[in-house]
Image: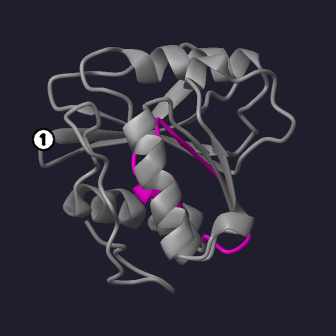
Amino acid sequence: MRIIAGEWRGRKLVAPDGETTRPTADRTRETLFSMLASRIGSFEGLYVADLFAGSGALGLEALSRGADRVLLVEQDANAVKALRKNIASFDAKAKCDVRASSVMALGPAQEQPDLIMMDPPYETGAGAVALDKLNRLGWIAPGAWISIETSRKEDLSVAGFDVDTVRDSGKGRIHLLRLANI
């Protein structure tokens, strides 16, 4: 695994030990960031949340492309260890807020991210459940973009959100969502 673009382009990422975590493939990450760039434009100055963060590849990719700071939430101990190694190797600690806990344990938002990226375990429905809870806790800013990766077998629907686009990439399916216009 490597950073695809930006300041750290080509730098290697450490993957978590064990079989618990499924890192987002480079090709899928490249597809996701291309989709986001065409909608967001620049990542400069964004506050990003990487939920179900694993190695932190999505959050670190956003930082490499100019994001100001990133919240990384991961509960698996091996993944948190790899995540911290990656942050240290990129000297990015000052821009990263790492929370070694479940996404479902997050409380009410203190600040709303501009971009939320989720790569939950496939075929669990965890992304939809987490997004619904985050919305009720005030995490979703008007105009924020949300990406959720699922398996190709999964469809995604969350009350109060419109699906902007869905694209298959490798074994995964990327869903881009926004708050519904009410």
- Membership of 60 in magenta stretch: no
Looking at this view, is 12 or 169 the one in front?
12
Query: Quadrant where the N terminus lies?
Result: bottom left
Q: Position of residue 127 (x, y in %)?
A: 44, 24
Mark 1 nearby-residue class (10 Å; few <14, some 14–19, many ≥20): some
- Membership of 56 in magenta stretch: yes
* Image height of 69 relative to 141, above or below: below
* Image height of 161 relative to 141, above or below: above
Q: Position of residue 79 (x, y in %)?
A: 40, 42
Question: Residue at 67% across / 29% down in the picture?
Answer: 181
Query: Quadrant where the C terminus lies?
Result: top right
Report if residue 77 is visible in the image.
yes
Span colored in magenta? 43-59
Q: Quadrant of residue 67?
A: bottom right
Question: Residue at 28% across / 47% down in the picture?
Answer: 23
Looking at this view, is 177 or 55 the one in front?
55
Report if residue 164 is visible in the image.
no
